[in-house]
């Protein structure tokens, strides 16, 4: 067991953090207030190589492993103080593109991955529907019917990150209702396909700097060659290949946010004077700081463990689920405690703690609720 990151990874982590501090953090407050998307930041991330970080080098990516991608996400979140852009990155790279990287044919990879790696195209995942969330496969209503050399899709997807700005979506649809999860197929959908449309941009409580919407399919025609893996096996194959990546890499943003909040709260507590002395000397404040550090270290070790198992080629359903539950719930606990340290200022928009508190709420909902994660843990035990 080696608990130290290699020097080159530490150097890369610092470089990603500095990039986020330079190009993302300065405008985070303004973009959050307006709920606006910044295409220039996205372009810079593509030039930096972040958008294709774990993609194979032969397709224009950086060839990074799961641990490197996890550490980079953590560093970006810490430096950016912008949950929305970090989420958009994860939705594009991990759940929108990695299914093609891990399950696509050589032709599919060659067509899509190079453009996704640069950010010329933006990706997303179409799984959740207005009536199906935790029971994603069993309650799925979107249908795909084979007609000659094409599939015709009808239905909709809800809460889709990158929906309004996306060019390519990995979309799941039922091809055989009788088979349940084994009757779901996955398709690579382009925004220009006939019958595809995007619903209105959703006005969210948090993650406001990322765009989210409904995707609508009305007799949308998808070429048969855009079927990802075999018919009726997509939900299981794609899910098995990518969900552990999602529950490790995307969740790493919580670690970065906790680190930032802890550092800022300690500085604040040293400078904030009440009853004639800095509040950092009060036992109640020290207790909150200590608890935050304990949660940070535990969450980081859990996530790194899951990432290392993925890099060894091992399945990590328990590890990734435990990491997701713990890190996302720790994020909520820490934002509350650090908010208490800030007092009334945590309620003011100009302080990043207020934005972080709103952003944190999504963690225990997206990518599988905490309740579903606990069910997965128990089932695997």
Image (cartoon, rainbow, N blue to C red):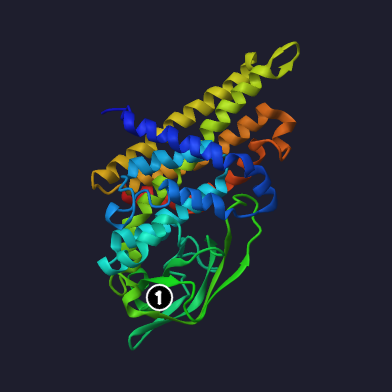
Residue 213 visible from this viewpoint: yes
Residue 255 visible from this viewpoint: no
103 relative to 69, above or below: below
Report the number of numbered marks. 1
298 relative to 122, above or below: above
Q: Nearer the viewer, residue 161 or 109?
A: 109
In percent of the image, x 35 and y 56: which residue is there?
242
Q: Nearer the viewer, residue 211 or 20?
A: 20
Query: In this image, 273 relative to 163: left or right?
Result: right
Residue 311 drawn at (x, y percent): 27, 44
Residue 148 drawn at (x, y percent): 33, 89
Label 1 sits on a secondary structure element that is: strand
**Farthest residue in the top direction?**
276
The quarter holding residue 102 reads bottom left
Residue 249 drawn at (x, y percent): 41, 46
Please give the residue where the numbered disc 1 appears in the rendered image: 174
139 relative to 24, above or below: below
Q: Nearer the viewer, residue 92 or 235?
A: 92
What crowding class fits label 1: few (fewer than 14 Cα within 10 Å), some (14-19), or many (20 or more)?
Answer: many
């Amino acid at each position: 067991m080696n608990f130290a990151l290699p020097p080159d990874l530490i150097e890369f982590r610092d470089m990603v953090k500095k990039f986020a501090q330079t190009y993302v953090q300065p405008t985070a407050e303004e973009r959050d207030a307006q709920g606006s998307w910044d295409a220039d930041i996205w372009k810079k991330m593509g030039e930096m190589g972040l958008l294709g970080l774990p993609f194979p080098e032969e397709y224009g990516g950086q060839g990074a492993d799961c641990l490197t991608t996890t550490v980079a996400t953590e560093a970006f979140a810490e430096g950016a103080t912008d949950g929305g852009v970090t989420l958009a990155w994860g939705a594009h790279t991990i759940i929108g593109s990695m299914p093609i990287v891990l399950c696509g044919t050589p032709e599919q990879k060659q067509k899509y991955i190079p453009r996704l790696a640069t950010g010329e195209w933006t990706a997303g995942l179409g799984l959740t529907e207005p009536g199906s969330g935790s029971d994603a496969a069993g309650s799925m209503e979107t249908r795909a019917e084979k007609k000659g050399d094409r599939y015709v899709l009808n239905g909709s997807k809800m809460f889709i990150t990158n929906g309004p700005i996306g060019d390519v979506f990995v979309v799941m649809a039922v091809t055989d209702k009788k088979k349940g999860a084994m009757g779901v197929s996955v398709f690579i959908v382009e925004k220009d396909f006939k019958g595809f449309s995007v619903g209105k941009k959703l006005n969210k409580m948090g993650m406001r700097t990322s765009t989210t919407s409904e995707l609508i399919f009305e007799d949308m025609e998808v070429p048969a060659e855009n079927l990802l893996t075999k018919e009726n096996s997509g939900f299981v194959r794609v899910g098995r290949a990518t969900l552990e990546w999602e529950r490790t890499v995307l969740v790493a943003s919580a670690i970065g946010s906790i680190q930032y909040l802890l550092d800022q709260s300690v500085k604040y507590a040293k400078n904030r004077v009440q009853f004639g002395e800095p509040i950092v000397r009060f036992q109640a404040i020290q207790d909150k700081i200590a608890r935050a550090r304990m949660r940070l270290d535990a969450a980081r070790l859990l996530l790194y463990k899951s990432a290392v198992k993925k890099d060894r080629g091992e399945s990590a359903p328990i590890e990734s689920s435990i990491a997701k539950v713990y890190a996302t719930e720790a994020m909520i606990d820490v934002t509350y405690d650090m908010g208490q340290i800030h007092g009334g200022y945590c309620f003011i928009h100009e302080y990043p703690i207020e934005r972080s508190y709103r952003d944190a709420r999504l963690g225990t909902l997206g990518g599988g609720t905490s309740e579903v994660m606990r069910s997965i843990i128990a089932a695997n035990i």
